[in-house]
């Protein structure tokens, strides 16, 4: 199991509002399956972040590209493997 940070850069703020309920529903479904570690918008409204839990980059990418915001072309996807550092 690994973590993958999907940075979703905002492209179309107006249409984003229309698609937002489907985006949230999609992420809620993945969250219920244990595929989401964290998620939320950036406060400057430039987009948001979803941290996926997956076995591979390919699996995380397959999940990320099905996000309605990505499918509709409202946000540009940047996906990177992410390492959690824990303070001791």
Image (cartoon, rainbow, N blue to C red):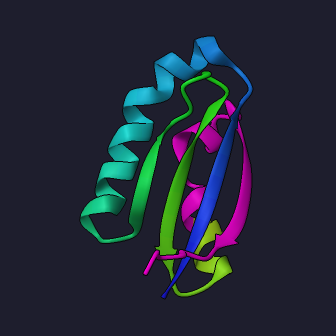
Total numbered circles? 0
The answer to whether 30 is drawn above or below residue 35 in the figure is above
Residue 58 at what x, y percent from top left?
67, 79
Question: Residue 8: which quarter of the image?
Answer: top right
In screen coordinates, is 58 left or right of 76? left
Residue 59 at what x, y percent from top left?
58, 77
In screen coordinates, is 65 left or right of 30? right
**Residue lying at 71% horizontally and 35% vertically, measured from the top left:** 73
Q: Residue furthest left?
A: 32
Q: Is residue 86 magenta?
A: yes
The answer to whether 11 is drawn above or below residue 60 in the figure is above
**Residue lying at 67% horizontally and 30% vertically, measured from the top left:** 74
Region of the chain picked out in magenta, as a range:
63-88
In screen coordinates, is 14 left or right of 30? right
Question: Residue 33: which quarter of the image?
Answer: bottom left
Residue 62 at what x, y percent from top left?
60, 68
The answer to whether 79 is drawn above or below residue 19 in the figure is below
Residue 30 at what x, y percent from top left?
36, 61
Q: Is residue 29 magenta?
A: no
**Residue lying at 60% horizontally and 22% vertically, measured from the top left:** 45
């Amino acid at each position: 199991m690994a973590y993958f940070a999907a940075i979703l850069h905002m492209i179309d703020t107006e249409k984003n509002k229309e698609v937002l309920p489907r985006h949230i529903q999609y992420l809620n479904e993945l969250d219920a399956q244990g595929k989401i570690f964290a998620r939320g918008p950036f406060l400057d409204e430039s987009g948001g972040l979803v941290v996926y839990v997956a076995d591979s980059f390919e699996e995380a990418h397959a999940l990320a590209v099905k996000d309605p915001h990505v499918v509709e072309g409202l946000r540009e996807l940047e996906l990177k493997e992410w390492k959690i550092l824990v303070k001791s």
